[in-house]
Image (cartoon, grey):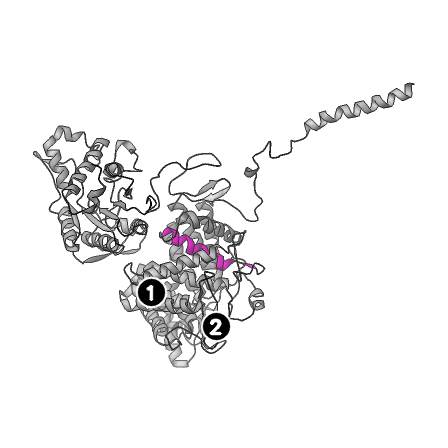
Amino acid sequence: MKKKTLIPLFLLLIFGLLPAKAQNKKEQANDFNTPLHLLDPDYNIPYGVPKTETIKKDLDRILAYLWDVTPATLINNRTGEEIKSTDQIDRHSGLKKGDFRLSSYEWGVTYAAMLTAAETTGDERYKAYVMDRFRFISEVRPAFEQVLRDYGSSDPQMRQILKPAALDDAGAMCAAMIKASRLNPELKLEPVISNYMNYIMHYEYRLHDGTFARKRPQMNSVWLDDMFMSIPAIAQMGAMTGESRYFDEAVRQISLFRDKMFVKEKGLFRHGWVEAADRQPNYFWGRANGWALLTLVETLDVLPVNHPGRDEILELLKAHISGLAALQSGDGFWHQLLDRNDSYLETSATAIYVYCIARAINKGWINPVIYGPVATLGWNAVSTKINQRGEVEGTCVGTGMAFDPAFYYSRPTSVFAAHGYGPAIWAGAEMIQLLNNLFPRMNDNAVQFYHMEQTTPAPIFSLGGRTDQFISGSSRKKGNPVLFLIGDSTMKNGTGKGDNGQWGWGSFFEQFFDTTRISVENHALGGRSSRTFITEGLWDKVLRGIREGDYLFIQFGHNDGGPLHTGRARASLKGTGDESQWVIMERNGGHEEVFTFGHYLRLYIRQAKARGAIPVVLSHTPGNSWEGDRVIRNSDTYGKWSKEVAEEEGVRYIDMNDLIATKCEAMGKEQTNALFMDRVHTSREGALLFGKMLIEGIQATPDLQLNQYIKP
């Protein structure tokens, strides 16, 4: 009996302890107890919003490496001794060999990228790298040119400069030299630039229709690579000389390449085109598409906004970016053959796409909400290929044109493939600018881009109401017109929400209108002048949302005085003439051509009219400044010039300055003081009154159709 009872008791003890042990185990996550959508994903590359300081460290590693391995030094090739004077250059002289050549097209890209990095980061070491090497080339060129004349041969790198024999020899270097020369004319690169441009424009082989072409691998072959090896330099020449023929040729070449190479259904460019073929080879090589995209960006950067070919290039850029974005891999890279996921992931093409997409966002050409995450993911991928030494890994070596996939699939990669360094620097620099311009952050585990900082700590959040910065035209309802406001802090102060009790009249202007039939968008930004509203890209962002039948109110003048190139450097030249003045900007050493106040107003008016909009020019608001019992007006300066330009351009002018000044005089100084928070900026009461006075000015202009939308 005792044995029979012991066994059940033992089993009870075992099973009785099991629940207690189970309670000590970590509870398994399931749908009931855990928000599974917030679990950390398992990414192969870093995911999220990178920090600008981390990007800068990546770029600095590349810079340090390139400083060490690309010396700007002459040696005697027989003795190996360094040559320290140009007087010692003879037929045995040459450039000291490093890891990379100083005069290749790949290094032309690197030089241009370095200049962008210097501008974006403020780190003069990047600019110094370029200037040191270009100055070196400029100084030794005459002696090597004499050697070439005397002996018929010269150092291979210098011969490439002196006697370019292909677009690869000339285009990228020429474009970079033009950029550097515009920053520092003392480099004395004009003879080199002229020599390059002479080859590109007059000696490179072309098809009958003028398209740049080659005689290999088949007769009359067009290489997509040659878009970049030629067109950006031509466009830069237009920017440097002001001669429209260069812009016209750049636009023409883009059109010729597009017609032969761009496959609309895919949004991609084919690598090669052969004149004799009845069916063209469709191999969409990654880096060649990068060269094409970079060409479009580089051209748009300098092509005048009123050039008749600009809109077509912009549309091509958008179509190409759309096609590329759809093919980005889950790891952020793009494939060697873009539409073949079993081809390897390639670094240089990815870096070029990151730069171009980020640049297009920063310029206001494409939507940051859609493409900001694409650029960010791409940069995160590229950053994993910058090793501790500063070498860029995973870059395809130089690649010709082929008509079978195995060729592209099997191209080697190397850290000594020079094609990866310039794109990586360019991509990082432009990403820094992008992150400084906008406010990306994680929302529901995904990278999202915002125009205003999102301060909520929530991992998932919604957006409520309109923000300070928004996409131009986004308020449009059912095709109704939009009234766009552009100006300074008297129109919108701070964020437009009463910062420090100061309000701009534009913050309340919508309340005077029937918003079921028209909407009002206040795109003004404090501290901006007629000049800086354009040069900072604000106008480009507004312009792209303007449609036929819209209205544009233009009001500047408060900030158009002061220094041209020092301090805030926002002044325009006085008057309405066509004169201009080149200045060197104190903040970055860059060159800028400054025009008159009237010139900038004409740009707004003409570009708005070209889109079918109705511009209205306003004189700027008066300050709380008096001479006796009379408010000081601007009728002899900016008010006068605003009126003159409006009359010349055939648009309406409303003298808001005089309307408000007259009202204040009727109220008297004591009551007027309540309208202002300081000498210029208004209180809520003042902003409302100023808007009301403008409405009276509109109503006093009966032929202005905007009257139909004013509330009774």
Pointer 2 residue: 77
Q: Is residue 626 above or below residue 173?
A: above
Residue that appears at 44% across and 52% down: 428
Q: Is residue 576 left or right of residue 474?
A: left
Q: Amino acid at mark 1?
A: Ala
Q: Who is closer to the viewer here, 90 or 28?
A: 28
Q: Position of residue 434 (x, y in %)?
A: 40, 48
Residue that appears at 27% across and 37% down: 507
| Residue 184 visible (yes or no) | yes
Q: Is residue 344 magenta?
A: yes
Q: Position of residue 562 (x, y in %)?
A: 20, 46
The region drawn magenta spans: 334-362
Query: The N terminus is located in which quarter?
Result: top right
Pointer 1 residue: 235
Q: Is residue 629 left or right of residue 112?
A: left
Q: Is residue 154 above or below residue 380?
A: below
